[in-house]
Amino acid sequence: MSENQPSALITIFGATGDLANRKLFPSIYHLFKKDRLNPKFAVVGTARRELSTEEFHNQVKESILDHVGPEEELDEFISHFYYISLDVANTDEFSKLKSLIDQLDEHYHIGGNRIFYLAMAPQFFETIAESLYKKNLKSAFGFNRLIIEKPFGHDFASAKELNDHIRQAFDEEEIYRIDHYLGKEMVQNIEVIRFANAIFEPLWNNRFISNIQVTSSETLGVEDRGRYYEGSGALRDMVQNHMLQMVALLAMEPPIRLNTHEIRSEKVKVLRALRPITGNEIAKSFIRGQYDAGVSKEKAVIAYREEDHVDPNSNTETFVAGKLMIDNFRWAGVPFYIRTGKRLTEKSTKIVVQFKDIPMNLYLKTEETLNPNLLVIHIQPEEGITLHLNAKKAGQFMDATPIKLNFSNKSTDGMNTPEAYEKLLYDCLRGDATNFAHWDEVALSWTYIDPIAKAWEETKEPSFPNYQSGSMGPKKAIELLDKDGFHWWPVTDLDVENC
Ligand code: BG6
């Protein structure tokens, strides 16, 4: 077996669901097309619904046609897909899954390599992991890997309970906790930008950086996920995982080696150094918002409280802005501001590193000051980096004018970068867990978030809804930076096309 073309039997729990259809089937197909999947592979879909093999094949075909486009080689690819209907709550039913995968393992000469992908509601994670173990679905030769979708718990206590259960069936090295932001090209690029360039790393500290801003804004509302979101809110849905992961990558020390263990342990140190936010500090450092009706992408949209499965008096936040402090030598005194929300002006994820002002401004004019140097990392939808500098304005006088140096991933490569899920699946196939969350990271993130989530649950926010759909969130989020003498860099102005 080639290390870069591993053979495996992939079992997907929740194979009739949205994630399987939108992301997993197209990703497996891309890996197949790129010869990253060994021809000795099989995919077993399971879900409660009764489906014939033919019906399942049609479903996979449709998913690929919808998300990839018309393709020629589909029949050969799809012949590797099998389906079995299963009630995951009933451990006994796992025996029939075992006989199917044992048979396929032999038929395709897979060599016992198994991936179990839990693309299901979190309440089933424990039972599935336990049944896989009890009913001997883990193979004794090859590898066994368990991929788990978020949310991994609802708070530290529930995450620990879930983890303790899963660990009875799978070792930490066998568990791949998905955070799809870690599969994004430009999130992975944070490390390279920092550690492969001599010009940034010496400046990457509290002597030269004044603040860092991470914005992940969405235009969509809660869509059909009201039931889940009511119990989650933006803090648990986005901050505990994606936002804190980006902060950890931005703030970590250079690892001594670029391997899974070293990178994860540097990220863990950042999370350990986060200054806990409790008591009175919560209202000073964290702002919550909930969207009202408004106009998004030129269409009138309803308020969060009017969405399906949402309490008309809901206290759930759809927006969070926060100020994080990292108490270590490198970052003492540098605020990391994060903000994320639904129904905002633009779909955009950006990181802005703002450098300190130069000690003396020789170019001050009556009404203008020099712009600070910014390094903008465009995570999505554009992928690239922009460096904001000052240069001489063409002409007679020595005036300064802002200029921007741009790098855009798409225009350079002339192609779309692979989807996060495709990369993460391939990582898992190769046994590379770097871009998955280790238990220690999950535990520390919950520990940080828990006091804030608890305080918000216990006190109703009287101002909800407090921002209009289509805006950039509540006023208080602006004041959060104002009082420190900073302001949010507007995401639209920073777009590569506006440079
Ligand atoms: C998911 C959240 O983890 O991330 C969603 O559950 C959110 O609520 C999504 O919409 C955002 O992901 P992306 O890749 O579109 O920024």
Image: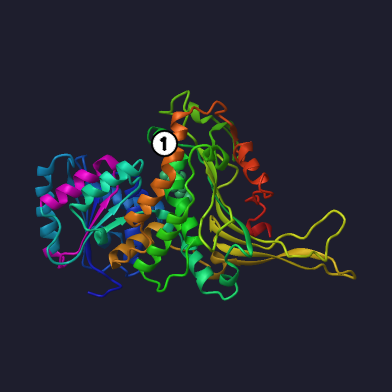
Q: Is residue 480 magenta?
A: no
| Residue 20 image position (x, y, % from top left) | 32, 49
> Disc 1 marks which amino acid?
Tyr
Q: Nearer the viewer, residue 317 or 167?
A: 167
State the count of labels: 1
Q: Which residues are magenta?
A: 106-135
- Residue 419's place in the image compared with 215, above or below, is below
Q: Nearer the viewer, residue 73 or 80?
A: 80
**Which quadrant does the C terminus fall into?**
bottom right
Is residue 108 shown left or right of residue 235?
A: left
Q: Nearer the viewer, residue 80 or 192?
A: 192
Indicate yes or no: mark 1 CB to ligand 1 under 8 Å.
yes
Q: Residue furthest right?
A: 396
Residue 419 seen in this snapshot: no
| Residue 84 image position (x, y, % from top left) | 17, 47
At x 44% / y 25%, what residue is drawn?
311
Which residue has dot 1 on it? 229
**Which quadrant does the N terminus fall into?**
bottom left
Q: Is residue 130 magenta?
A: yes
Residue 1 seen in this snapshot: yes
Badge 1 crowding class, 10 Å Cα cut-off, few under 14, some 14 to 19, many 20 or more, is: some
The part of the image, by quadrant, that contains residue 441 is bottom left
| Residue 312 image position (x, y, % from top left) | 47, 23
Is residue 414 shown left or right of residue 443?
A: right
At x 64% / y 51%, what residue is drawn?
492
